[in-house]
Every structure is written in C-alpha cells, then in structure tokens.
Image (cartoon, rainbow, N blue to C red):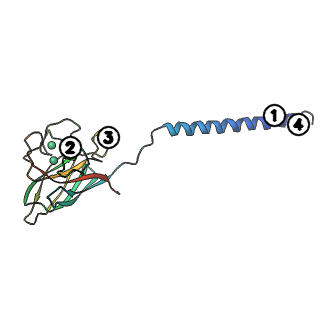
Amino acid sequence: MCFRFPSSLRFLGLAAALGAAASASSLLRAADMAAMPVAAPAVTAAVAVLIPTDGNVVHGEIHFTKVAGGVRVVAQVSGLKPGGHGFHIHEFGDASSADGTGAGGHFNPAHEAHGAPTAEHHHEGDLGNLTADESGHATIDFVTPALSFEGAASIIGRGVVIHADPDDLTSQPVGNAGKRVAVGAIGIAKS
Ligand SMILES: [Cu+2]
Ligand SMILES: [Zn+2]
C-alpha cells in the first residue's frame, strides 16, 4: 500500500501533465491555423447588370460562367441603336459617373495592345462587338480562354462597358468605340 499510493498519485500527475500538454498543443495548432491564409471557395459564376449612362436607355445583363476551355460569356442587351457596339471589360466596376468614365480604361493586366478577342495581342477586357438588331436588342454567347476569375487577371469587381459605336478592333488604345452608353460592375454570382 505504502508503495502503490504514491505511485497512483504520480500516475495522476503524469496524466494531468499529459493532458495539459495535449491541450497546449491543440491551442498551438489552432493558432497556427488561424495564421494560415484560408482558401476562398473558387468563383465559378459572375454577373454584370448594366446601368445606362446619362441620356441613354441601355439595359441588360452579362453572365460569365466557368466552363471547360475558359469562361462562357452570355449577354442580353436592349435599348441600343441598331448596329455594332464596342463591348469591353474595363478596369473599374464603378458605374457612378454620369458618362461612364469611372470605369477607367480597358482591363489589361498583361499590358498588351488593344485588339480583337481572337487576335494574338489584345487586352484581357477586349470582347469585340455586340450587334444590335432593328429593335435595339443584342445577344451574344461565346466561350473565351482569355478571361479569369482568379488572381491578378480576375474580372471580378471590374466593369463591363457598352459603347455608342463599333470597336474597329485595331485603333489604339480603345478601338475608337466612342462614348459609353452603359456600365455594369461584375459581381460574384450564385453558381
Ligand atoms: Cu470600352
Ligand atoms: Zn482594349
């Protein structure tokens, strides 16, 4: 008895010490994890709702969806004058200015020249033209490998701009597409 009693005390002491060590290391692990960057869920869909600039009645939506081979762009726009209209992603998703200039220049993270979306060199934001019919409606649906939802090239938070005139796809730096008739900020959409 004389031997066992202190022995169990030593055992209890050891268990308590082990328990304390275990909870201390759990705390450390939790602290380490808190310091680590948490990966945000990958964005797979985005949308821009167009707001007309002063004196214009252009409305519409542009949907962006991650698909095999890049990003699918589906646009439905109304209130346009018939014909071609420059269609771009600009640097800022700021539709607050009356003339649309708050959207800045073409989104161009790779510092390329302006061009057609199918050209070897073009801004990431160069989407070509929308063509409106006699009633002012334009639709387009295509897949491009040029757009991204991730990193420095991500289009999230940037702005879609529709222009009054056609983008000639060659003039620098913006294709001579004229005034901005609508701007919409690109936000994350429910997948
Ligand atoms: Cu533009
Ligand atoms: Zn451009």
User: Which residue is found at the position 62% from the left and 36% from the top?
Assistant: 25
User: Which residue is found at the position 66% from the left and 38% from the top?
Assistant: 22
Q: Earlier in the sequence, mark 3 or mark 1?
A: 1
Q: What mark, if any, has residue 92 been given in the picture?
A: none
Instruction: Report, in whole angstroms, how far the alpha carbon at label 2 lies from the one at label 3.
Output: 20 Å
Q: Position of residue 46 (x, y in %)?
A: 30, 53
Q: Earlier in the sequence, mark 1 or mark 2?
A: 1
Dot 1, crowdedness within 10 Å: few (<14), some or many (≥20)?
few
Instruction: Report, in whole angstroms, how far the alpha carbon at label 3 lies from the one at label 4.
Output: 64 Å
Callout 3, which amino acid?
Answer: Gly
Residue on which disc 4 sits = 5
Name the residue furthest right.
Answer: 2
Dot 4, crowdedness within 10 Å: few (<14), some or many (≥20)?
few
- Label 3: state its secondary structure: helix
Residue 118 in view here: yes
Q: Earlier in the sequence, mark 4 or mark 1?
A: 4
Do labels 2 and 4 touch, CB within 8 Å?
A: no
Residue on which disc 1 sits = 10
Instruction: Report, in whole angstroms, how far the alpha carbon at label 1 lies from the one at label 2.
Output: 73 Å
User: Which residue is found at the position 13% from the left and 40% from the top?
Assistant: 114
Q: Is residue 64 left or right of residue 176?
A: right
Q: Earlier in the sequence, mark 2 or mark 3?
A: 2
Q: Position of residue 65 (x, y in %)?
A: 28, 54
Dot 2, crowdedness within 10 Å: few (<14), some or many (≥20)?
some
- Label 2: state its secondary structure: loop
Q: Earlier in the sequence, mark 2 or mark 4?
A: 4
Callout 2, which amino acid?
Answer: Gly
Callout 4, which amino acid?
Answer: Phe
Do labels 3 and 4 touch, CB within 8 Å?
A: no
